[in-house]
Image (tube, rainbow, N blue to C red):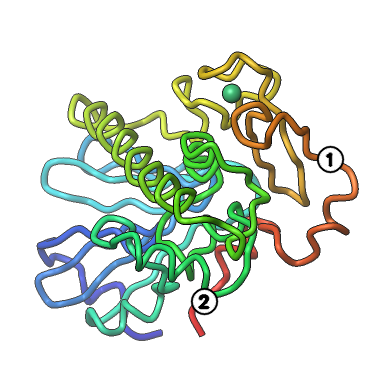
Amino acid sequence: MEPLLESIEGHTIRGLRRVGKRIAFGFDNGHWLVLHLMIAGRLHWKAAGAKLGRRNDLAAFDFPAGSLVLTEAGSKRRASLHLFRSDAEMETINPGGIEVFGSDLAAFRAALTAENRTLKRALTDPRILSGIGNAYSDEILHAAKLSPLQQTYKMNPEQWERLFAATLSTLQTWMDRLGAEAREKFPEKVTAFRKDMAVHGKFRQPCPRCGSPVQRIRYADNETDYCPTCQTGGKVLADRGLSRLLGADWPRTLDELEALRKK
Ligand SMILES: [Zn+2]
């Protein structure tokens, strides 16, 4: 297999980037090591020379000051590591969705309306938007007061403005919050379920805006949480039979979503 892992041994990391949902470490010889944690992958900072002995230990990256250890819980091995020789080679792994920061409303709208999609599907499709998953799409749609089943072809200009503003403010709020936590100490408790989230993971709990109980739609091994009062005009979206109703236009399994590549 080329390039060999040995080709980055002893080299200095000069850059750190996010590529979609992946973390990319850039080396002084132009190589990039790209890590995707998927659902259960985690990074831990240990004393230098950490040993890998436990079942969940997958890799250790030894630095002079400590070891960065990659673990993955559970029996499904989904986390991945790729090594590339150049920026161009690394780009082949990028699903190609636009970065919301640095895009304007017109570009955002164009990306989300390339095909008619439900908002839930469009927001979480890595070929449309970069780096937004199940949790933050729920939070964005709640902030925008839009239904996860809203079709992108049927949105008015005012709804587009609301969605774009909510996407930026939701992501910025969480980047600030999680960034501040990580500056204090290495983030060991990484989770998609946060106490301060409005609807994600809050099934049956009161919506922080209106107090209505948060509802959940389950589909395949994915789910979406929303407030009927704030987002769907009071309508509880049927859980059963949705697969038939939505057909292909719903995020299927996370694995399938992650496997999507730009064509
Ligand atoms: Zn509400």
Mark yes or no: residue 54 visible: no
Instruction: From this view, report whether residue 25 is shown above or below residue 167.
Output: below
| Residue 13 in which image quadrant | bottom left
Q: Position of residue 134 (x, y in %)?
A: 56, 46
Nearer mark to the viewer, of 1 and 2: 1
Question: Quick check: 32 above or below 92?
Answer: above
1, 101: nearer the viewer: 101
Residues at circles 1 and 2 in contact by the CB criterion of under 8 Å: no
Relative to 90, 229 lies left or right: right
Residue name at image x 52 percent, y 69 percent:
113
Q: Amino acid at mark 1?
A: Ala
Q: Position of residue 88 (x, y in %)?
A: 26, 84
Residue 66: percent from the left, percent from the top?
19, 41
Q: Nearer the viewer, residue 131 or 182?
A: 131
Disc 2 residue type?
Arg
The residue positioned farthest toward the front in the image shown: 157
The residues bearing labels 1 and 2 have C-alpha atoms spaced at a distance of 31 Å
Q: Residues within 10 Å of mark 1 (few under 14, many from 20)?
A: few
Q: Which mark is residue 238?
A: 1
Q: Quadrant of residue 109?
A: bottom left
How many tags in the picture? 2
* Mark 2, secondary structure of its residue: loop
Residue at x-position 38% and y-position 81%: 92
Mark 2 Cα shell of 10 Å, populated few (<14), some (14-19), many (≥20) = some
Q: Which mark is residue 261?
A: 2
Q: Residue at x 52, y 17 (%)?
A: 208
